[in-house]
Image: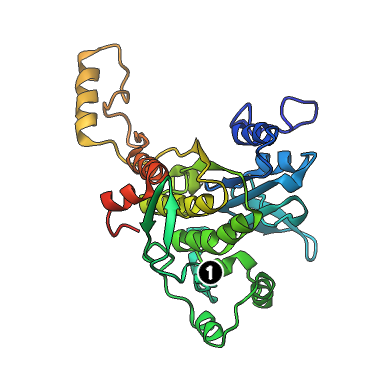
Amino acid sequence: VNGLLAGGESCGFCIFNSVAAGAMHALSNESCERVAIVDIDAHHGNGTEEIIKKCHDPGRLLFFSVHIFDRDRRKGRGAGSSTPGYQFYPGTGDQDDVAHNIINVPLAPLWREKEVAGGAVSAAPATANASAKEPIQTRGRTKRRGSSSDVSDKPSPATSEASSNGVETSGADTAAAAAKDGRPAHYLLGTGRMAYRRAIQQRLLPSLRAFNPDLILMSTGLDASREDVGNARHYIGGKQKMGLDLKPEDYAWTTKKILEIANICCQGRVVSVLEGGYGRTGPRPPQASSVAAAAAAADSSVPPGAGGQPADETTTLHDLDKSVFAECAIRHLQALVDPFDDEMRHPGST
């Protein structure tokens, strides 16, 4: 919506919002009444949210975004005053917008793990998948699915007690519990890949099924993968702390869960658009460094410090290692094409 307009803001990542454009095009077709957009990368889909809010008929759209949310507050000079400090980009997406069918699930980053560990974690049982041998129809094949792909982490004592009494904690209750001890409400989900899975299981799947879309579009950013620079907090001097640690099997699991809903609602119609993922930093492999150094030594025009030649002690050369990012993309694609074939290729990985 904004962009190269007077007084407008541009984040600089894209010229066109492909997923939002695809959703609008699909809704122009008479056979498509409702479209759901699922954004699973490490950052809030603020651009997509803005477009949906200005859509003439937002009731036909559902937007879900799971992402890191973190802000620092610096104390000001005045009593009780504070100024904004660090915020994980873009610093939005901490609240839902029910009127526009917008569901935001902020996650606490791993660098807040100690603070998050100070309270209970909401890990409600996955009651929607209680039937371990229920047959499902997928792409013309009838298979039986087990319950091994559900969230398997242990609930906290507080949650276990509530579950044993037949009481499930609502979002308002968890927010009130967090406010009572001064912690942000989203800390109750925990951190890392288990918090991510809880967000998918507890917030996305029920909402997606209730919305009953005719088409599901995925904004598939893979920058939430383990050690990807896209989910890191960067410090002066090159140091960084990771915010999420998703593994390839987490992306496969998420894809299969979305497909389960798609098979019920829209005959498996899911479109995935790759939107992010950068790689992890690290020292160059010795083999690559030696080859580059040999090539630079043979070329007298290459300055010191380039091509692997030693320069001063403060010079470090780091290439982005895309191996984890690539594996996540492959597992997502395999699960998207045939989730049962993915399970046979990678037994027990979920």
Residue placed most toward the observer, 244 or 234:
244
Query: Which residue position is annotated with label 1?
Result: 116
Count of labels in the image = 1
Judging from the image, the colouring scheme is rainbow
Residue beneath the point at 65% across and 48% down: 63
Q: Quadrant of residue 76?
A: bottom right
Residue beneath the point at 36% across and 53% down: 249
Residue 226 can be seen, yes or no: no
**Could you tell whether 308 is left or right of 144 in the image?**
left
Q: Position of residue 132 (x, y in %)?
A: 40, 69
Residue beneath the point at 60% across and 55% down: 208
Q: Quadrant of residue 285?
A: top left
Q: Position of residue 178 (x, y in %)?
A: 64, 73
State which quarter of the image contains the C terminus.
bottom left
Residue placed most toward the observer, 130 or 193:
130
**Could you tell whether 78 is left or right of 265 in the image?**
right
Query: Helix, strand, or loop for circle 1?
Result: helix
Q: Position of residue 275 (x, y in %)?
A: 52, 36
Q: Residues within 10 Å of mark 1 (few under 14, many from 20)?
A: many
Q: Amino acid at mark 1?
A: Val
Residue placed most toward the observer, 125 or 196:
125
**Could you tell whether 226 is left or right of 85 in the image?**
left
Residue placed most toward the observer, 83 or 34:
34
Q: Position of residue 174 (x, y in %)?
A: 64, 73
Residue 345 can be seen, yes or no: yes
